[in-house]
Amino acid sequence: MNQEKIWKAVLAQLEVDLSPAIFKTWFKETALVKIEDGVAEVSCPTYAKKRLEERYYGQIKKALDSVTHQKNELVLKTSVTSKPKNKDQETVNNYGPLFKPKQKRNSSTGLFPQYTFETFVVGPNNNLAHAVARAVVENPGKTYNPFFLHSRVGLGKTHLIQAIGNAIKEKHSDLRIVYCTGESFTNELLDAIRRGDRAESGKFREKFRKSDVWLIDDAQFIAGKESTQEEFFHTFNALYLDQKQIVLTSDRPPQEIARLEERLSSRFSGGMITDMQAPNLDVRVAILRSKRDREGLEVPNEVIDLIAESIPSNIRELEGAFMRVAAIARSQQKAITVDLAKKALGGIKQEKEEKLTAGDIIREVCSYYSVNLKDIKGPRRPKNLALARQVAMYLLRSKADLPFMEIGDVLGGRDHTTIMYGVGKIKNLMDENAKFRGEIRTLESRLR
Ligand code: ADP
Ligand code: MG
């Protein structure tokens, strides 16, 4: 039995013995890191360590002893990273960290320290964006304001906007920097409104309006939400008039953000708009080499070339493939060779060639219309949500060939007649309205 299986069995026993709330609170994020010579090392979140040691040590040990048929000594350690996200990561964790753990977000600015200009590789695909970003750091609020940066996903927007924040913090330590995403801005605002507390709303307002540098990542998310756009507009104006620096990122240029108020899209377009493209082969190689050196991994250049050639259009996927190759080599305790990399990448390619899944389609629709996954599957039917949902129905039918019944299931258990109606409605709309047809075509091209 491997560690993962052992721990599953231990948790299964504990789950029977404990109340669901206790189990969930204290045990959900535990893992067996190592078991050797009768010593079992168990990782847990910092907040849970004391409690587990004081209250549940005996119970954990009993379950573990019975699963492993031996007497174990138990050592609890706090985990560096939170729960492993995927299989590769688990393999990595079992052998100690392969990659340096991600550094913590700065609590006052909301920035991650690892996103800096030093680690940002510049090439023909992003050199303009990079130059503008540097200029913004030199003269916040003066040269390019607002700075609007757009690109498809995985091409470095978050990295660059955070690098701006981190560099300004270093250079102008007196300036107040506030980083948020379109989504977190929306959620915080709605929270403040829901609580109906004037002081809370005031605090929210103050946090943004008192900033010297306002960084908004994935700003497209605010589109289609009336109260959010209203608040956003006033915050934007207040800061702009005060010559405070504003930087926005988005997955498309302002005019193409569906249901973004005109007054906002014109404000967004009032400064510098720059895009970033997919990197060419040289840049991809440079990105991987820099990552290799930073992580101190032994990866031959030929392997880097191979990975860079295989993953052309998304830097996040490029890094993912690189880490996957390294993780597989580590788990098999082999050197990283071209052969091994080919095998590991073969898996990735196969995944890519599979048919579009319902999940892909729904996620893309959600991102395009800036709605939540939960909401699109949920019961609510405000206009923008209902439209996004029907577009999802249409694409699930036309792109994934799903039967109406199944579409109903994946969209939160809706009746198949509802789906038929929705698909028909979108077809009609496309016939009647050229702009809408364009929207659907854009979405379709993103799915390819
Ligand atoms: P986006 O926000 O556009 O979806 P991210 O900024 O999250 O993309 O980038 C995805 C990953 O690729 C991140 O890990 C980031 O550090 C890395 N990355 C993107 N562009 C570069 C670059 N020019 N040089 C080095 N790493 C990059
Ligand atoms: Mg991003």
Image (cartoon, grey):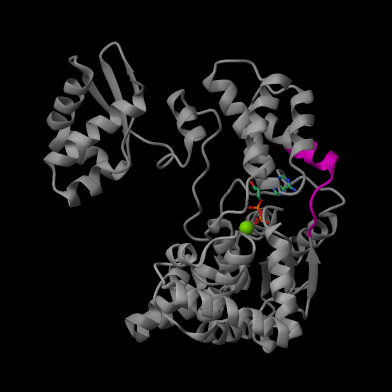
282 magenta-colored: yes
Stretch in magenta: 276-287
Picture quarter containing residue 329?
Answer: top right
Position of 363 relative to 104 (above/below) = below
Q: Residue at x 75, y 74 (%)?
A: 145
- Judged left or right of residue 386, residue 278 is right
Q: Residue at x 70, y 81 (%)?
A: 430
Position of 382 relative to 390 (above/below) = below
Q: Residue at x 53, y 86 (%)?
A: 226
**Residue 213 in view (yes/no):** no
Picture quarter containing residue 369?
Answer: bottom right
Image quadrant where one finds the N terminus = top left
Position of 172 relative to 354 (above/below) = below
- Quadrant location, ligand no. 2: bottom right
66 magenta-colored: no
- Judged left or right of residue 149, residue 124 is right
Q: Residue at x 69, y 73 (%)?
A: 440
Name of the residue lying farthest toward the top: 37
- Judged left or right of residue 428, residue 135 is right
Looking at the picture, how far across and down is residue 11, in whole percent? 24, 35
Looking at the picture, how far across and down is residue 155, in whole percent? 72, 53
Q: Nearer the viewer, residue 76 or 222?
A: 222
- Judged left or right of residue 99, residue 248 is right
Position of 352 relative to 396 (above/below) = above
Looking at the picture, how far across and down is residue 171, in whole percent? 68, 56
**Residue 339 in view (yes/no):** yes
Looking at the picture, how far across and down is residue 322, in whole percent? 66, 34
The mark total stands at 0
Picture quarter containing residue 289?
Answer: top right
